[in-house]
Image (cartoon, rainbow, N blue to C red):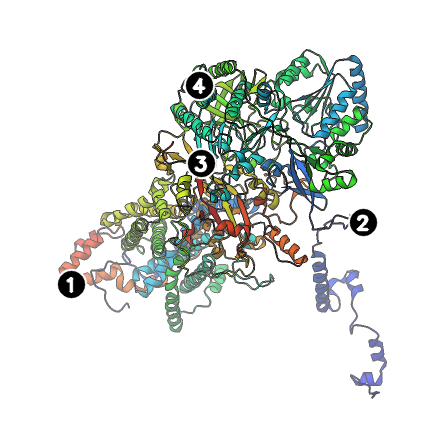
C-alpha cells in the first residue's frame, strides 16, 4: 500500500516531521517501557479507589441482599440495569471500529482501534458484573447457562430474552477479546524484541512466538479479516438483544419494535463518545498527538453527530407512535417522561443526547478539542439518563396506578455505579502501561501513504492541482499537531 | 468336570523357590517403609516416589472423608406413643369461639396455626375479621408473661394464691370495696364465676369498662324503651340504610356480621334479582363504611345533632323546636332527600349513629321508631351482648378509688391506664389500693402498676364460652396446653373465692349441663360432645315486642344542641376519634400482622396520623407527613398529617389504639395515644373534641402501601356503573355479549395450555368487597408471608400476596368520576369522593407474561391453570415482576427470616411455630406471589383421592375466600360448569382486568355498582 500516492485532498492520518518506523515504535511504547508519570499515578490512584469502592459496595450487596439497593415492588430494575445497558453500549464502539471500519478499509481506524477495543472489553466486563450483582441469588449466576445438571430435567428458558442476553454478551465478549488479542500479537512481539529480563520472558509468552515472517503476516491479516467478518454481525446483534430485554416485555415504554435499531445507534453513539473522552486525554498525556490527529477527532465527532441524530429520530418516532397507537398506557408513559415526577431525567436524556449533539453540525465545534471533550461527557451522561428513563420512568408508573411508586437510590446503588467507573478506568490505565495503546504495526502501514510528511513530499514534488493544494492546506488549519508555518513556503 | 489344572505365573512359582515362598508371604511386593518414614527418614527413604503417591492417596482420601460435612442434626423425634388424634402432616380442626363468633382452629401436630370461621356461625357464616385471623400469632408471642409476677419479680402460683387469699380475707374483714374491672364479658360461665366471687365477697363489684364504649346506645334504649340493651341490628333487612358516623362495616359493634348482612342486598345474587339496598352515610372522617356508601355526605361532629333533628323533623313532618337548616348546604339538601327515601322504605329502613352520646342516640331511636324499624331491622328482644361497658360506673369507680374507698382490684382484659381518658387519676387512685391484681398476659400499662400479675391463658389455651347475641352460645375449647406457666383467670377467681368447684373446665361443664345445653336441645355427655363438635347452640329467639318511642324530645334536642354548640366553638378544629379496622382499641398492638395490615382507606401501616381534608392541607400549609401538634381537652400529641379526601373541612380524625408504651416490642411507641382526647359528658365517653393545631416543623413520612390514589381514567382496570344503568343493561361497561371484543384471537406467539381436569380460577365481586383487609391477614397466616416493618413498607416493599387497591374518584359538579391526577389538581371540591376497592392478587394468567421472561423457568404454568413459582429455581432477576402488569409479585429483598435488622415476629424459635408447615419459607433473593393456596388445592385433591371421588365444588377454599365476610371471592374449577365460580363468572358484570393485553387472566372481576341516580350529588 505504501507504494502508491494518496490524493492530496485527504487529510493526513499521521502528522509531524521526521516520523520513521522507529520513531513510531519509540513514541507509542514510551508509556510501556518507562516508569509512569505523575499524571498516570494520580489517575490510577483515583481510579483504583473507585475500584475499591466497587468491591466494597458489591460485597455489601452480596452480604446483605439486593434490598440494600433502592429497588421496590414496582421498580425491579433501576441503576443496575441502567448501568448494565450503559456499559454494554459503551462497549460498542470498539467492535465497530475494529471490524466494520476494517472491512470498509477506513484506515483512520488504525490509530484508535486498539484503545477502543480495550475499552470494549473493559466496558463489557463492567456490564457483566452488573448482570451478576443484580441477581437476587448471585451465587447461582450460572443457572441461566445451558449446563447439564443434576436437578433432573431442568433446562433454561429459551423464550427469555435474558437467556439470549447471556449468549449475546458472552459471544461478544469472547470474540472481542480474541480479535483484540490477535491484533496485539505483532505489537507484543515488538515489545518482546526490545525488552530484557523477565519482561522479555512475559512478552515472548504473550506474543505467541511471533516471528514476523511474511507467512506470519499473511496469516495475521487473514485472521483479522475473518474475525472482522465474525464481529460485524455482533455489533448489530448484541445491542439488538439487549434491547429485546425491554422490547419483548409488556411494559409500556419498553414494548416497542423500534428498540433494536434505536439501541444499536445509541450504543455506537455512546461508545464513540467514550472513545473520545478517553483518547482526547490519552493523546495529550501520552504525547500521541501525531497519531491521533484532528482528523480522527473530527471523524469521530461526525459519527457521534450521525448516531445522535438517529437516536433523536428514534425518540421522535417513539412519541409519534405513542400518540398514533391510541394506547392509553403507552401515551401516559411518554407523557410521564415530561410531566411526571422524573421530568428532569427526561430533560437530561433529550437535552444531552439530541440538543447538545446537534452543535456538532458546526466545524468549529467538531474541531475544538475542549468542546469535543465536554460534549463527549455530555453524551455519556445523556445516554445514562436515556437508560434510566427507559427503565425507571417506564416501570414506576405502568398499568395499575395503585402500585405506582418512586425509586430512590441508596448509597449502595451510587457506590456500585461510581465504583464500576473506577473499575473501568483502573483496567484502562493498567492497559496503557502494559500494552501499546495504539496499534503500532497498523499505524506503520499507513506512514508511507497517509502521513503528513508523505503529503508534504507530494507537495514539494509539485504538479498538483492548485485548488486541491489550497483545500488541503485549509484542512490542516484546525490540526493542533501541524505547524502551518511550514506550508507558507510551499 | 472338575479340573485339577494348576496355573503358574513363573518358574519360581512352579518350582516354589525359597525366595518366592518368602516373598509371597507379604501382601505387597515391596515392604512399606513405614518404620523408615516414622523414624524420621521422611520421603528420603528407600522408595520415596511410590510412598509419596501412597501417602498422597491416603492423605487425599482421609481429607476428603474428613471434609465431608456432617449433616446438620435435626431433632425430629417420632412419637413414642402416638396420640390418638394426631397424624403428622394432617391438620386437626377444633371448634372454638372468638369474639362470640364460632370458629375452627386448625392445628398441626398439636399447635394451632390458623383460625378459620365456622361455616355454620350464625353471625358471619364463616367470615372472620383480620383481627380474628391475626389472633393466632399472639399465642406465640414471646413477650407474654411466662409466670405470675409480684411487684415485677417472678412469683409462684402457690405463693400468689396464698398472698391474694390472705389479702382478700383481710380486705373482706375491713369492709372496703373490692372491684373487678373488665372489658365487656359476654361469656356466661365467666359471668357466673364473677357472680360466685361476688357472692363470696359481698363488698365486691363487677364493673364493665370498654375503651371504645357503646354506653350511649344502651342508655338511650333504657331511656326510650326501658331496656338497657345493645340492640341486634339487621342490615340485611334494610333497603335504606342511613348511618351517622357509625362505621358498621369496619369497627362498629359486630363488623364481620354486619358486612355479611349488608352485602346480601348488594352482591351478585341480589343484583340479579334486580335488588340493591341504598346506603347513605353522614360522617366526619372517611371510614370504610363511608367508602362503601352510595352517597356519603361529610359533616362536622357539631353538625351531626342538627342533622338528626332535621331528619326527625322531615320524617315526622313537624319541626322540632330548635330545628334550623344546616349551614352545610349539601348536607341540608341531603337530609330532606334521605327523609323521603327512608319514609318510602318504612319498615325496611335503618338509621344508625356511631355517637356514644345518650341524647343523640335517643333521637336516633325516635327516628327509627317513626320508620318502624323496631321488630324489623332492630331487635331489642334478642339483643347483642358484645358490649356492655358502663362509662359512668367506671368514672364513679375511679373517683371512689381516688377517695381511698377501694381496697382490692382485679383487672380482667382491661387496660385503663392506657385507654382511659384520664389515666393520671387512675394511677393516683391505684396508689391507694391495697391489693391490685391484673390478669393481663403482658406486663401492660395497667398490669405494670399492679402488685400481682396472674397471667391469664390465651383464648386458644382456655376453656370457656361466649354469648355474642341473645340465644347464641358458643363454646371455647383449648387447642394447646398452656404454653407458659399461665392459668385461666376464671380458675384463679375460683380458687381465690374458695369455690366448691376449683377447676374451671368442670365449672364450665356444670354451667352448660345446668343452663345452656338444654337451650340447644342437648343434654348429658353426648350433648357436650356434640357441642364440642358443632361449636355452638342456638336457642329459640325471643318473641319480638312492639316498641314505640313515646318520650318528649324537647329536653333531648336541647342537650344535643348544647353539645353541638360546644363543639362548634369558635374557630377551633373539631377532632373526631375513630378506630382503625386493623388496630381497633389497641389491645392487639403487639401483633405485627395487624400493624402491617394497611388501613383500608388511608393505606397507612404502622402508625396513626391526623387525617386532614385536602382543602385544609392547602389552607393550613401542610404537606403529607408534616408533624402537627394537636392540643385539646388538656392533652397534646404530635402526629403526622395526611391529606384524606372526604375528610370534612375544619375537622381532623385521629385513630385511637396507637401509642401503646408497654404492649411489647412490636407495638410500643407505634403512633400516639389519642384516648386522652376522650371526655365524659352526661355519663358517657365522647369521641369528639375541639382542638388547636400547630405545625411543629418536623416531617415524619407515613408508610403507605399505596401512594397514587386515582385510577387515571383506566377503565379496563376498574369498571363501575350506577344501579339505574345496571337495571337498563346488566352488561353495562363490560359489553358482555356478542359485541364483546375477543382479545385472544390474535394469538400468534402463545402456546395454549390444556387444562384437562381442573382449571382453577377465581371470581371477585367488586360490589361485595368492602375492603376490610381480612383476606390480607388470612393470606399472611396461611402462606407464611413475612412482615417487613415500617421502614421497608415505606420503601414500597411490603410482601402481601393479596392487596386491596383503593381508588378515589371525584365529583365534578355531579358530572361523575374525575380520576386523572392532572384534572384532580384543578378541582376545588375534594370532599365528595367516591371510593372503589379492588382486591389484587396474582391473576394466574393463561398467557402469563412473567413465565416467558424467566431465564431459568422458575415460574411456569401448571396443567390446572395455575401460574406456579419454583422458589428453589429462582435466581432473582426480577424480570417477572417488572413484566407483571398487575404488579403482584413480591421479592425477598432480604432474608426476612434471620436478618437481625428485621427483628420481627419470625425470628425466634417459638414464634416460628405459627408457620404453616405446608408452605415453605422463602430465602433472600427469591420471588414469591400468590399460589392460589396450592397446598390447599393439593390437600383437597388428595382427600378426594383417598375417598375415591372427584373433587367437589367447595371442597377447596382458598384462605382469602374462606375468611371474606362479604363472600366477595369465589374460587373453583372453571371446567365444572356447575361450580359456584363458573356461575359467578357468567354474570354479565364479569370483566377481566387489563384483558386487552391478551394475557388471559384467571380472575374475573364483577363491575362495581352504585345505587345512585345520575342526577343526585
Q: Are marks 4 and 1 in contact (CB under 8 Å)?
A: no
Instruction: Judge left or right: residue B477 versus residue B888.
Output: right
Pick the front one: A190 or B559: B559
Q: Neighbour class for label 3 at 10 Å: few (<14), some, many (≥20)?
A: many
Give the foreground label among 2 and 3.
3
Residue at image point 37% right, 38% down: B820
Q: Are marks 3 and 1 in contact (CB under 8 Å)?
A: no
Give the residue pinned by disc 1. A464
Give the foreground label among 3 and 4.
4
Instruction: Give the mark nearest the N terminus, 4 or 2.
Output: 2
Q: Neighbour class for label 4 at 10 Å: few (<14), some, many (≥20)?
A: few
Q: Same subunit under labels 4 and 2?
A: yes
Pick the front one: B275 or B643: B275
Q: Are marks 2 and 1 in contact (CB under 8 Å)?
A: no
Instruction: Judge left or right: residue B544 versus residue B629.
Output: right
Residue at image point 41% right, 61% down: B748
Letter of the chain that mark 2 sits on in the rendering: B
Q: Same subunit under labels 3 and 1?
A: no
Q: State the SS at label 1.
A: loop
Give the residue pinned by disc 2. B81
Give the residue pinned by disc 3. B835
Q: Quadrant of the N terminus of chain B?
A: bottom right
The x, y position of residue B863, in whole percent, is 55, 59
Letter of the chain that mark 3 sits on in the rendering: B
Amino acid at each position: 500500500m505504501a507504494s502508491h500516492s494518496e490524493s492530496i485532498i485527504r487529510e493526513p492520518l499521521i502528522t509531524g516531521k521526521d516520523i520513521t518506523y522507529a520513531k513510531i515504535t519509540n513514541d507509542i511504547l514510551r508509556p510501556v517501557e518507562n516508569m509512569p508519570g505523575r499524571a498516570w499515578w494520580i489517575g490510577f490512584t483515583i481510579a483504583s479507589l473507585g475500584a475499591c469502592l466497587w468491591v466494597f459496595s458489591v460485597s455489601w450487596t452480596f452480604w446483605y441482599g439486593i434490598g440494600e439497593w433502592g429497588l421496590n415492588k414496582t421498580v425491579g430494575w433501576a441503576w443496575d440495569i441502567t448501568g448494565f445497558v450503559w456499559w454494554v453500549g459503551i462497549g460498542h464502539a470498539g467492535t465497530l471500529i475494529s471490524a466494520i471500519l476494517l472491512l470498509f478499509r477506513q484506515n483512520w481506524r488504525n490509530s484508535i482501534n486498539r484503545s477502543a477495543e480495550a475499552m470494549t472489553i473493559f466496558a463489557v466486563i463492567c456490564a457483566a458484573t452488573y448482570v451478576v450483582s443484580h441477581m437476587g441469588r448471585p451465587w447461582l449466576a450460572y443457572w441461566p447457562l445451558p449446563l447439564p445438571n443434576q436437578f433432573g430435567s431442568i433446562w433454561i428458558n429459551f423464550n427469555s430474552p435474558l437467556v439470549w442476553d447471556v449468549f449475546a454478551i458472552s459471544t461478544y465478549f469472547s470474540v472481542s477479546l480474541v480479535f483484540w488479542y490477535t491484533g496485539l500479537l505483532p505489537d507484543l512481539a515488538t515489545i518482546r524484541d526490545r525488552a530484557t529480563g523477565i519482561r522479555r520472558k512475559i512478552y515472548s509468552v504473550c506474543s505467541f512466538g511471533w516471528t514476523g515472517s511474511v507467512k506470519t503476516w499473511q496469516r495475521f491479516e487473514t485472521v483479522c479479516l475473518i474475525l472482522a467478518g465474525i464481529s460485524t454481525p455482533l455489533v448489530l446483534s448484541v445491542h439488538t438483544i439487549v434491547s429485546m430485554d425491554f422490547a419483548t416485555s409488556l411494559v409500556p415504554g419498553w414494548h416497542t419494535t423500534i428498540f433494536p435499531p434505536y439501541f444499536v445507534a445509541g450504543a455506537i453513539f455512546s461508545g464513540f463518545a467514550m472513545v473520545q473522552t478517553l483518547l482526547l486525554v490519552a493523546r495529550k498525556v501520552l504525547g500521541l498527538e501525531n497519531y491521533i490527529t484532528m482528523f480522527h477527532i473530527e471523524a469521530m465527532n461526525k459519527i457521534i453527530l450521525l448516531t445522535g441524530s438517529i437516536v433523536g429520530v428514534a425518540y421522535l418516532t417513539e412519541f409519534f407512535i405513542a400518540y398514533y397507537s391510541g394506547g392509553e398506557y403507552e401515551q401516559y408513559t411518554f407523557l410521564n417522561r415530561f410531566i411526571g415526577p422524573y421530568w428532569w431525567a427526561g430533560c437530561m436524556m433529550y437535552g444531552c443526547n439530541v440538543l447538545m449533539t446537534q452543535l456538532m453540525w458546526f466545524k468549529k465545534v467538531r474541531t475544538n478539542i475542549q468542546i469535543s471533550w465536554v460534549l463527549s461527557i455530555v453524551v455519556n451522561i445523556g445516554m445514562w439518563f436515556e437508560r434510566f428513563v427507559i427503565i425507571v420512568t417506564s416501570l414506576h408508573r405502568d398499568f395499575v396506578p395503585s402500585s405506582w411508586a418512586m425509586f430512590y437510590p441508596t448509597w449502595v446503588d451510587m457506590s456500585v455505579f461510581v465504583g464500576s467507573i473506577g473499575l473501568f478506568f483502573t483496567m484502562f490505565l493498567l492497559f496503557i502501561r502494559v500494552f501499546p495503546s495504539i496499534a503500532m504495526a497498523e499505524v506503520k502501514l499507513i506512514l508511507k501513504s497517509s502521513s503528513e510528511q508523505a503529503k508534504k513530499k507530494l507537495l514539494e514534488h509539485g504538479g498538483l492541482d492548485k485548488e486541491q493544494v489550497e483545500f488541503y492546506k485549509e484542512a490542516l488549519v484546525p490540526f493542533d499537531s501541524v505547524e502551518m508555518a511550514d506550508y507558507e513556503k510551499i | 468336570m472338575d479340573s485339577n489344572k494348576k496355573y503358574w505365573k513363573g518358574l519360581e512359582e512352579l518350582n516354589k523357590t525359597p525366595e518366592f515362598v518368602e516373598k509371597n508371604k507379604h501382601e505387597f511386593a515391596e515392604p512399606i517403609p513405614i518404620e523408615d518414614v516414622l523414624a524420621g527418614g521422611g520421603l528420603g527413604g528407600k522408595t520415596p516416589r511410590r510412598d509419596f503417591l501412597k501417602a498422597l492417596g491416603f492423605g487425599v482420601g482421609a481429607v476428603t472423608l474428613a471434609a465431608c460435612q456432617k449433616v446438620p442434626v435435626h431433632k425430629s423425634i417420632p412419637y413414642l406413643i402416638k396420640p390418638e388424634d394426631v397424624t403428622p402432616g394432617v391438620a386437626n380442626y377444633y371448634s372454638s369461639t372468638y369474639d362470640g363468633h364460632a370458629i375452627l382452629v386448625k392445628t398441626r401436630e398439636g399447635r394451632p396455626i390458623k383460625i378459620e370461621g365456622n361455616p355454620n356461625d350464625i353471625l358471619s357464616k364463616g367470615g372472620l375479621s383480620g383481627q380474628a385471623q391475626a389472633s393466632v400469632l399472639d399465642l406465640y408471642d414471646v413477650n407474654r408473661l411466662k409466670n405470675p409476677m409480684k411487684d415485677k419479680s417472678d412469683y409462684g402460683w402457690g405463693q400468689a394464691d396464698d398472698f391474694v387469699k390472705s389479702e382478700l380475707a383481710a380486705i373482706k374483714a375491713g369492709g372496703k370495696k373490692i372491684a373487678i374491672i373488665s372489658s365487656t364479658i359476654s361469656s356466661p360461665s365467666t359471668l357466673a364465676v364473677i357472680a360466685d366471687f361476688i357472692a363470696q365477697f359481698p363488698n365486691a363489684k363487677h364493673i364493665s369498662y370498654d375503651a371504645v364504649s357503646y354506653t350511649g346506645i344502651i342508655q338511650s334504649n333504657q331511656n326510650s324503651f326501658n331496656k338497657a340493651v345493645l340492640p341486634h341490628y339487621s342490615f340485611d333487612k334494610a333497603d335504606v340504610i342511613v348511618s351517622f358516623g357509625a362505621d358498621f362495616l369496619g369497627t362498629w359493634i359486630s363488623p364481620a356480621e354486619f358486612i355479611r348482612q349488608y352485602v346480601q342486598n348488594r352482591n351478585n345474587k341480589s343484583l340479579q334479582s334486580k335488588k340493591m339496598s341504598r346506603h347513605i352515610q353522614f360522617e366526619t372522617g372517611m371510614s370504610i363504611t363511608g367508602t362503601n356508601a352510595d352517597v356519603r355526605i361529610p359533616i362536622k361532629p357539631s353538625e351531626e345533632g342538627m342533622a338528626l333533628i332535621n331528619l326527625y323533623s322531615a320524617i315526622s313532618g313537624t319541626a322540632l323546636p330548635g330545628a334550623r337548616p344546616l349551614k352545610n348546604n349539601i348536607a341540608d339538601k341531603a337530609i330532606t332527600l334521605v327523609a323521603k327515601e327512608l319514609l318510602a322504605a318504612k319498615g325496611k329502613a335503618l338509621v344508625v349513629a356511631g355517637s356514644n352520646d345518650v341524647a343523640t342516640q335517643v333521637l336516633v331511636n325516635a327516628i327509627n321508631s317513626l320508620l318502624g324499624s323496631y321488630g324489623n331491622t332492630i331487635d331489642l328482644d334478642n339483643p347483642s351482648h358484645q358490649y356492655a361497658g358502663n362509662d359512668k360506673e367506671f368514672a364513679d369507680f375511679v373517683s371512689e378509688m381516688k377517695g381511698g374507698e377501694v381496697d382490692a382490684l382485679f383487672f380482667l382484659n382491661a387496660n385503663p391506664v392506657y385507654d382511659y381518658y384520664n389515666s393520671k387519676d387512675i394511677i393516683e387512685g391505684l396508689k391507694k389500693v391495697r391489693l391490685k391484681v391484673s390478669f393481663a398476659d403482658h406486663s401492660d400499662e395497667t398490669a405494670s402498676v399492679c402488685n400481682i400479675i396472674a397471667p391469664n391463658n390465651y383464648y386458644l389455651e382456655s376453656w370457656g364460652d361466649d354469648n355474642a347475641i341473645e340465644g347464641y352460645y358458643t363454646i371455647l375449647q383449648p387447642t394447646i396446653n398452656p404454653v407458659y406457666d399461665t392459668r385461666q383467670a376464671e380458675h384463679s377467681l375460683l380458687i381465690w373465692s374458695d369455690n366448691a368447684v376449683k377447676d374451671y373446665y368442670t365449672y364450665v361443664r356444670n354451667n352448660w349441663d345446668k343452663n345452656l345445653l338444654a337451650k340447644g336441645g342437648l343434654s348429658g355427655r353426648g350433648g357436650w360432645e356434640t357441642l364440642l363438635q358443632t361449636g355452638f347452640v342456638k336457642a329459640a329467639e325471643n318473641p319480638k315486642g312492639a316498641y314505640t318511642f313515646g318520650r318528649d324530645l324537647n329536653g333531648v334536642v336541647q342537650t344535643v344542641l348544647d353539645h353541638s354548640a360546644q363543639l362548634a366553638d369558635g374557630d377551633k378544629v373539631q377532632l373526631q376519634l375513630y378506630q382503625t379496622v386493623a388496630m381497633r382499641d389497641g389491645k392487639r398492638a403487639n401483633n405485627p400482622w395487624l400493624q402491617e395490615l394497611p388501613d383500608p382507606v388511608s393505606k397507612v401501616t404502622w402508625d396513626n396520623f391526623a387525617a386532614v381534608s385536602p382543602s385544609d392541607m392547602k389552607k393550613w400549609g401542610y404537606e403529607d407527613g408534616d408533624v402537627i401538634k394537636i392540643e385539646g381537652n388538656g392533652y397534646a400529641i404530635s402526629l403526622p398529617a395526611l391529606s384524606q379526601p372526604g375528610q370534612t373541612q375544619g375537622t381532623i380524625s385521629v385513630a385511637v389504639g396507637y401509642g401503646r408504651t408497654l404492649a411489647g416490642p412490636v407495638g410500643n411507641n407505634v403512633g400516639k395515644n389519642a384516648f386522652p382526647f376522650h371526655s365524659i359528658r352526661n355519663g358517657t365517653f365522647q369521641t369528639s373534641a375541639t382542638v388547636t393545631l400547630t405545625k411543629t416543623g418536623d416531617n415524619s413520612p407515613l408508610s403507605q402501601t399505596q401512594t397514587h390514589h386515582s385510577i387515571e381514567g383506566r377503565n379496563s382496570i376498574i369498571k363501575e356503573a350506577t344501579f339505574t344503568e345496571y337495571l337498563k343493561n346488566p352488561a353495562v361497561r363490560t359489553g358482555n355479549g356478542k359485541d364483546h371484543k375477543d382479545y385472544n384471537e390474535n394469538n400468534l406467539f402463545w402456546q395454549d395450555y390444556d387444562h384437562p381436569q381442573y382449571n382453577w380460577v377465581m371470581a371477585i365481586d367488586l360490589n361485595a368487597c368492602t375492603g376490610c383487609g381480612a383476606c390480607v391477614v388470612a393470606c399472611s397466616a396461611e402462606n407464611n408471608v413475612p412482615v417487613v416493618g415500617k421502614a421497608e413498607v415505606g420503601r414500597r416493599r411490603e410482601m402481601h400476596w393479596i392487596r386491596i387497591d383503593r381508588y378515589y374518584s371525584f365529583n365534578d359538579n355531579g358530572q361523575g368520576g374525575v380520576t386523572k391526577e392532572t384534572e384532580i389538581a384543578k378541582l376545588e371540591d375534594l370532599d365528595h369522593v367516591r371510593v372503589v376497592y379492588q382486591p389484587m392478587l396474582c391473576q394466574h394468567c393463561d398467557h402469563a407474561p412473567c413465565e416467558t421472561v424467566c431465564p431459568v423457568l422458575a415460574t411456569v404454568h401448571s396443567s390446572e391453570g395455575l401460574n406456579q413459582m419454583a422458589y428453589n429455581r429462582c435466581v432473582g432477576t426480577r424480570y417477572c415482576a417488572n413484566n407483571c402488569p398487575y404488579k403482584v409479585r413480591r421479592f425477598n429483598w432480604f432474608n426476612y427470616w434471620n436478618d437481625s435488622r428485621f427483628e420481627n415476629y419470625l425470628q425466634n424459635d417459638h414464634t416460628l411455630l405459627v408457620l404453616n408447615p405446608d408452605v415453605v419459607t422463602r430465602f433472600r433473593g427469591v420471588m414469591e406471589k400468590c399460589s392460589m393456596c396450592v397446598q390447599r388445592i393439593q390437600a383437597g385433591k388428595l382427600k378426594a383421592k383417598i375417598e375415591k371421588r372427584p373433587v367437589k365444588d367447595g371442597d377447596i377454599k382458598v384462605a382469602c375466600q374462606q375468611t371474606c365476610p362479604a363472600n366477595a371471592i369465589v374460587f373453583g374449577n372453571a371446567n365444572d360448569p356447575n361450580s359456584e365460580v363458573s356461575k359467578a363468572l357468567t354474570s354479565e358484570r364479569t370483566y377481566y382486568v387489563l384483558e386487552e393485553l391478551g394475557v388471559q387472566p384467571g380472575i374475573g372481576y364483577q363491575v362495581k355498582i352504585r345505587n345512585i341516580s345520575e342526577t343526585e350529588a
